[in-house]
């Protein structure tokens, strides 16, 4: 992997990780359109450490409060009814589905799931789901001629059942094209949560899953011994800086705006991808590497 490729891919990762448009799909498509090798699931996982570092800093006050309350609840029964302590447990509970499926489906994630036809399908399908969820949320918020405005749920109403559903939605993002934030936010909106609550829990829920995945891949890459550490680290730093700016913008955007621009973008991109693959302009496996070590090339 060249330094230029690392810069572009780090930029793409930072721009798309927190938007409901699938960062893994965009990394895959960037490589395919540019004629580069697929950066691979391992590269994606490691650069996501950079974007999750942005989450840790942006939500540092929330995270510190939740972690502190959770630890105190282990020894103080009175603390177990505290919302922050419960949120700590709910993040753990919500992380179970992606942890189990991530290990179980590791070979599929690194192989068949990276087919561009599957990516296109997920872009369109999850775009439609997000559109429906967004429409239902808007209907509750605005009301109508024969409908009263309906109050949506906050994170204080989050329980174990909803936490597991959020977690199951997040696990769907193991397939490129789904989008971690898109799936969890859609799930939250369909369960009646506000846009802000769904997005906030989505970002918090991603922390243990992404960091665990990145560290796991980092361990494998280190043991493999053939890693372009410079470009990979550079891409991770770029992803961090850009990702922080995107979080700040996105959290303001969702308080007043609809997700429909992302819905339209996903559907159009999915249709375009199908057209390009169908016309033979792109191979369904364009740019794929054969399980190369992260950050390396078959030609290195």
Image: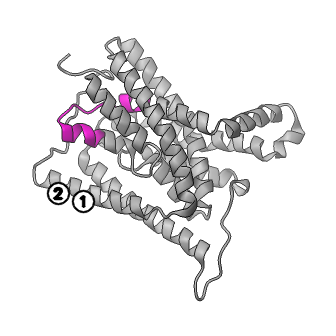
Query: Which label sits on residue 271?
Result: 1
**Residue 153: x percent and y percent?**
67, 62
In depth, the one of 175 and 136 nearer the eye is: 136
Q: What secondary structure is found at the residue carrying circle 2? A: helix
Identify the residue at image location x=41%, y=30%: 238
In depth, the one of 207 and 191 nearer the eye is: 207
Q: Are marks 1 and 2 in contact (CB under 8 Å)?
A: yes
**Residue 300: x percent and y percent?**
20, 16
Decide whether the magenta segment is chiefly helix, strand or loop: helix
Is 34 colored magenta in this rendering? Answer: yes
Find disc 2 in the rendering and name its residue: 275
Region rendered in magenta: 28-46
Quarter of the figure with residue 239: top left
Identify the residue at image location x=35%, y=49%: 177
Quarter of the figure with residue 256: bottom right
Circle count: 2
Q: Residues within 10 Å of mark 1 (few under 14, many from 20)?
A: some
Asked if residue 184 is positioned above or below residue 217 in the image, the reply reads below
In depth, the one of 11 and 92 nearer the eye is: 11
Is 123 colored magenta in this rendering? Answer: no
């Amino acid at each position: 992997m060249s330094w230029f490729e690392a810069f572009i891919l780090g930029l793409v990762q930072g721009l798309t990780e927190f938007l409901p448009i699938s960062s893994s799909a965009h990394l895959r498509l960037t490589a395919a359109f540019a004629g580069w090798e697929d950066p691979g699931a391992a590269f994606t996982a490691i650069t996501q450490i950079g974007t999750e570092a942005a989450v840790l800093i942006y939500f540092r006050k929330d995270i510190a409060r939740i972690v502190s309350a959770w630890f105190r609840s282990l020894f103080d029964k009175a603390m177990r009814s505290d919302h922050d302590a419960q949120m700590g447990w709910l993040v753990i509970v919500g992380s179970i589905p992606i942890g189990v499926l991530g290990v179980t489906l590791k070979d599929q994630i690194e192989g068949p799931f990276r087919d561009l036809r599957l990516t296109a399908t997920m872009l369109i399908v999850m775009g439609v789901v997000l559109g429906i969820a967004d429409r239902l949320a808007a209907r509750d918020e605005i009301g109508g001629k024969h409908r009263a405005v309906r109050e949506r749920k906050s994170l204080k109403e989050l329980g174990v059942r909803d936490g597991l559903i959020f977690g199951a939605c997040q696990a769907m993002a193991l397939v490129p094209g789904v989008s971690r934030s898109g799936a969890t936010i859609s799930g939250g909106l369909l369960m009646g949560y506000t846009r802000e609550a769904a997005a906030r829990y989505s970002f918090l829920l991603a922390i243990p899953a992404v960091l665990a995945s990145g560290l796991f891949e980092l361990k494998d890459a280190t043991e493999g011994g053939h890693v372009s550490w410079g470009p990979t680290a550079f891409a991770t730093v770029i992803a961090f800086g850009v990702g922080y700016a995107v979080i700040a913008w996105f959290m303001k955007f969702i308080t007043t705006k609809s997700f429909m621009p992302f819905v339209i973008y996903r559907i159009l991109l999915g249709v375009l991808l199908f057209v390009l693959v169908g016309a033979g302009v792109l191979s369904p496996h364009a740019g794929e590497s054969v399980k190369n070590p992260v950050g390396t090339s078959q030609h290195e």
